[in-house]
């Protein structure tokens, strides 16, 4: 973790450009820029700056954002539910559509159903999520006026959150679907040709039972690991979607912090991210045990 | 299997479709903008500074202008230092030697959030804070201020160390930057929190700020001019131009910042939409580093000037936004050079440019490598046009496109030979002239000091006619020397719904840089 924090700190300082200009803008007088650098300790030696960052992270005091002078921790805390909403909803859509579609295309391999399924998943993979987002906004928000264009909804109102979540979740969910469909298909194809599936069929088990009790359960392990990795990626890659929908979240906070060279904010988010990725990996490992009883942890 | 797959698929389709239709019927969150809420979509990721003295940018200033008042104000929709009017001061007078100014204050004005009546003590507090280098980044404008005293509850006297005309003094007391009057009681109670909790006397009061999302103001029912027209004003941070435009067209915002390009304007135009194009203009000028070879040769600088066609730049950006510029101060600024002598306009003449290069001993032209330019379209595109036109006369510039803040660093450290710098300043000549053309200045990218005598004399001059003449002479010297070649100006572009009445006739210019939200603005 120390290495991660040091890495983040160094990368931030390597970024070309002066945070004072990035934050205060073109019209700021030279005196404002000087005062800014002094106030935020940017004129101090780097080891001293790193030390104050490190002691902040260790004591849980992230301090103030350089860009807007507001405390950082509440800003991150506020962003997390929006990011989780989108990540969970996107993954749920991916699983809900992707697994059945993957099973279908595998079961009916080399038939028109398979071709159609593969074409759809290829299209889903090729289309950037932000572009899909713009299309969804254009048709569903602008033309039909079904959904809002901007924002993430009121945190304390679940309906408002869901209402604002539908389009962004669809944007990320559809590309997830494409991904999961392909993984499910290939994993399923491997399993349905194994001996135990053929044995099950030979002893007269119904086709439905063969598919869902025998084949699918065994095909789930790679799907779980893909979803696990993808959740990690999704937390970061949903950035473009959050920009298009102007949706709050960690991704948006991060982009804002990068564009304004907001060192204090970015360092805190990155530290937080590193923590989240560790947790997601742990959960993924635990999920293996759930889907495959042969995997046990001691 | 076939049956199950289809069934599962239809189920999922049904759930999603049902949710979409159901939510649409409920639809409680559909419209953000409403009859009593004004929603303003700003082209910014965030609001940065809520303390008027800590260097707010133009979006911040638009917010602050609705919260605070100054002793004087610009006329709504017009920024002209010669035509200011009363705000928190009812009237003012100066001593004959222009070194002592007395302000009679408006009575019965209340600060927001119960911080009590506005009095002379608040003015003294605010101006003392403005003088302090530690609390005000614009302290330099307040250096001439001496003793500031409250003669009684409603009278303030400001002693000056040097004589100041109304033209130079009153802009420091405007409802803008450090001229905004703060509450002494609020400062005592809030301490450091004053920097993020603006307490003023203006038509709207600060309610909440959710970083990178929105800032909400609510109506100040006690506003001294009358009851403001909106219950709430919500500033939404919408940095992405496409989602800002769609949100505007879908009715989620009533006012939006438009990118300074004809293309962006054409996308927003339509029935029920008013495009406001206003100043003060952003002045674009190409600074040439006179200490570098071959730019140290006047003939080379002249060749560059003759090679550039301002009309091409203006045509590319669009006539609703850009205008050609012939002096470093636009003609409509107080002290702008008007008319510019024909010989100093350097109208496009490539043949003359080539001849000048030959005279300078560079018949085959020369190259400059690198010239840095910001990645922002506002700078990059005109610079690419300039690059193309210079190439036609044999001057090759190798453009290095870099991040905007990094570009500023290159400019300030003196490693960029050609700096296309923009400045939006108070529309009186001295602001730009002193910042960019006074010898030794941090932003004097051309290293020019040829007009120092005129500029310094103008600083102490109390006769406005003489002062304007000195500013004009300084501009002639800048043009003769071509320390910088004025290229074009850009207006600020804001789109608003027709239903929004501004509360004044026309927005010709705005001090904050955004559309002013005046107390009597309302929906009709």
Image (cartoon, helix red, strand yellow):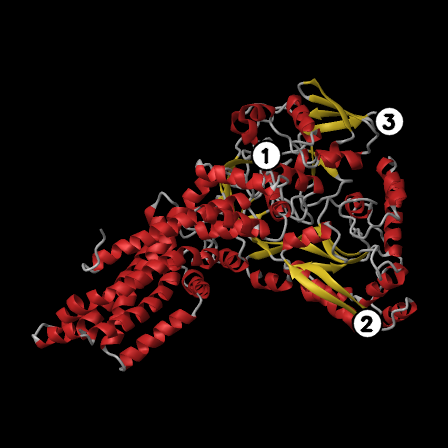
Q: CA distance from mark 3 to mark 1?
A: 34 Å
Mark found first going from the N terminus, 3 or 1: 3
Horizontal relation, residue B227 to residue B383: left or right:
left
**Which mark lies nearer to you, 3 or 1?**
3
Q: Could you tell which of marks 2 and 3 lies nearer the N-terminus?
A: 3
Q: Residue furthest left?
A: A203
Q: Is residue A252 above or below residue B466?
A: below
Q: Which residue is mark 3?
A: B97
Disc 2 from disc 3: Cα separation: 56 Å
Q: Residue furthest top?
A: B152
Q: Circle 2 sits on which residue?
A: B393
What is the chain letter for disc 3?
B
Residue at the disc numbered 1: B202
Residue found at the far front of this picture? A298
Question: Is B292 displayed left or right of B507 in the figure?
Answer: right
Q: Would residue A252 appear left or right of B82 to someone viewing this image?
A: left
Q: Residues within 10 Å of mark 2 (few under 14, many from 20)?
A: many
Whether B61 is drawn above or below B319: the answer is above
Chain letter of the residue carrying label 1: B
Q: Nearer the viewer, mark 1 or mark 2?
A: 2
Q: Position of residue A34 (x, y in %)?
A: 67, 40
Q: Position of residue B455 (x, y in %)?
A: 86, 43
Q: Nearer the viewer, residue A16 or A132?
A: A16
Element under disc 2: loop
Chain letter of the residue beneath label 2 in the structure image:
B
Query: Is the residue marked by circle 3 packed among few (<14), some (14-19), or many (20+) residues within 10 Å?
Result: few
């Amino acid at each position: 973790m120390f290495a991660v924090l040091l890495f983040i700190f160094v990368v931030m300082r390597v970024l070309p450009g002066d945070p004072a200009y990035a934050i205060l803008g073109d019209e700021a007088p030279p005196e404002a820029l000087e005062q800014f650098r002094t106030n935020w300790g940017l004129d101090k030696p780097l080891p001293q700056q790193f030390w104050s960052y490190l002691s902040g992270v260790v004591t849980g005091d992230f301090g103030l954002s350089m860009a807007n002078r507001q405390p950082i921790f509440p800003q991150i805390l506020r962003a997390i539910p929006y990011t989780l909403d989108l990540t969970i909803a996107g993954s749920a859509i991916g699983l809900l559509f992707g697994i059945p579609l993957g099973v279908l295309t595998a079961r009916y391999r080399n038939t028109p159903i398979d071709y159609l399924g593969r074409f759809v998943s290829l299209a889903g993979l090729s289309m950037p999520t932000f572009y899909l987002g713009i299309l969804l906004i254009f048709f569903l928000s602008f033309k039909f006026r079904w959904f809002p264009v901007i924002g993430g909804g009121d945190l304390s109102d679940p309906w408002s959150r869901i209402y604002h979540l539908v389009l962004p979740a669809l944007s990320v969910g559809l590309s997830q679907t494409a991904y999961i469909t392909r993984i499910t298909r290939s994993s399923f194809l491997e399993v349905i040709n194994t001996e135990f599936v053929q044995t099950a069929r030979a002893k007269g088990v119904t086709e439905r039972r063969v598919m869902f009790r025998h084949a699918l359960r065994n095909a789930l392990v790679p799907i779980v690991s893909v979803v696990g990795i993808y959740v990690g990626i999704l937390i970061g890659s949903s950035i473009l979607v959050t920009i298009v929908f102007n949706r709050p979240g960690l991704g948006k906070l991060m982009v804002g912090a990068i564009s304004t060279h907001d060192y204090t904010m970015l360092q805190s988010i990155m530290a937080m991210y590193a923590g989240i990725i560790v947790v997601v990996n742990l959960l993924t490992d635990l999920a293996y045990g759930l889907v495959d009883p042969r995997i046990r942890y001691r | 299997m076939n049956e199950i797959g289809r069934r599962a698929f239809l189920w999922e389709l049904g759930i999603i479709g049902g949710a979409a239709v159901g939510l649409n019927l409920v639809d409680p969150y559909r419209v953000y903008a409403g009859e009593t809420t004004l929603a303003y979509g700003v082209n910014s990721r965030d609001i940065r500074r809520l303390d008027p003295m800590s260097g707010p940018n133009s979006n911040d200033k638009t917010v602050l202008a609705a919260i605070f008042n100054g002793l004087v104000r610009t006329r709504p929709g017009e920024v002209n230092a010669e035509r200011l009017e009363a705000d928190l001061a009812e009237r003012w007078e100066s001593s004959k030697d222009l070194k002592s100014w007395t302000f009679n204050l408006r009575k019965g004005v209340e600060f927001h959030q119960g911080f009590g009546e506005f009095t002379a003590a608040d003015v003294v507090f605010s101006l003392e804070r403005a003088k302090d280098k530690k609390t005000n980044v614009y302290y330099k404008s307040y250096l001439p201020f001496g003793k500031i005293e409250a003669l009684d509850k409603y009278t303030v006297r400001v002693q000056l160390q040097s004589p100041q005309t109304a033209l130079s003094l009153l802009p420091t007391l405007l409802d803008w930057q450090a001229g905004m009057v703060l509450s002494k009681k609020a400062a005592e109670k809030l301490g450091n929190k004053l920097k993020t909790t603006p307490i003023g006397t203006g038509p709207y009061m600060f309610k909440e700020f959710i970083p990178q999302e929105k800032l909400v103001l609510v109506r100040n029912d006690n506003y001294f001019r009358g009851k403001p027209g909106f219950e709430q004003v919500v500033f939404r941070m919408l940095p992405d131009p496409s989602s800002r435009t769609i949100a505007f067209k879908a009715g989620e915002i009533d006012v939006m910042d438009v990118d300074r390009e004809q293309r962006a304007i054409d996308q927003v135009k339509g029935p029920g939409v008013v495009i406001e194009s206003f100043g003060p203009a952003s002045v674009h000028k190409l600074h040439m580093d006179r200490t570098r070879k071959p730019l140290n040769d006047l003939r080379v600088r002249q060749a560059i000037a003759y090679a550039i066609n301002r009309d091409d730049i203006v045509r590319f950006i669009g006539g609703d936004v850009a205008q050609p510029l012939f002096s470093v101060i636009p003609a409509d600024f107080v002290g702008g050079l008007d008319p510019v002598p024909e010989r100093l306009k350097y109208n496009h003449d490539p043949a003359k440019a080539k001849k000048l290069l030959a005279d300078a001993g560079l018949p085959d032209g020369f190259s400059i490598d690198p010239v840095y330019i910001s990645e922002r379209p506002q700078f990059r595109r005109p610079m690419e046009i300039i690059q193309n036109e210079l190439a036609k006369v044999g001057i090759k510039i190798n453009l290095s496109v870099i991040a905007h803040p990094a570009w500023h660093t290159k400019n300030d450290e003196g490693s960029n030979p050609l700096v296309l710098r923009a400045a939006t300043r108070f529309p009186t000549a001295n602001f730009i002239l002193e910042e960019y053309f006074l010898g030794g200045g941090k932003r004097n990218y051309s290293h020019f000091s040829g007009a120092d005598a005129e500029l310094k004399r103008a600083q102490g001059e109390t006769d406005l006619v003489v002062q304007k003449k000195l500013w004009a002479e300084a501009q002639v010297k800048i043009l003769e020397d071509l320390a910088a070649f004025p290229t074009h100006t850009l207006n600020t572009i804001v789109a608003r719904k027709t239903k929004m009445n501004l509360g004044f006739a026309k927005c010709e210019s705005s001090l904050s840089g955004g559309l002013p939200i005046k107390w009597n603005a309302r929906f009709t």
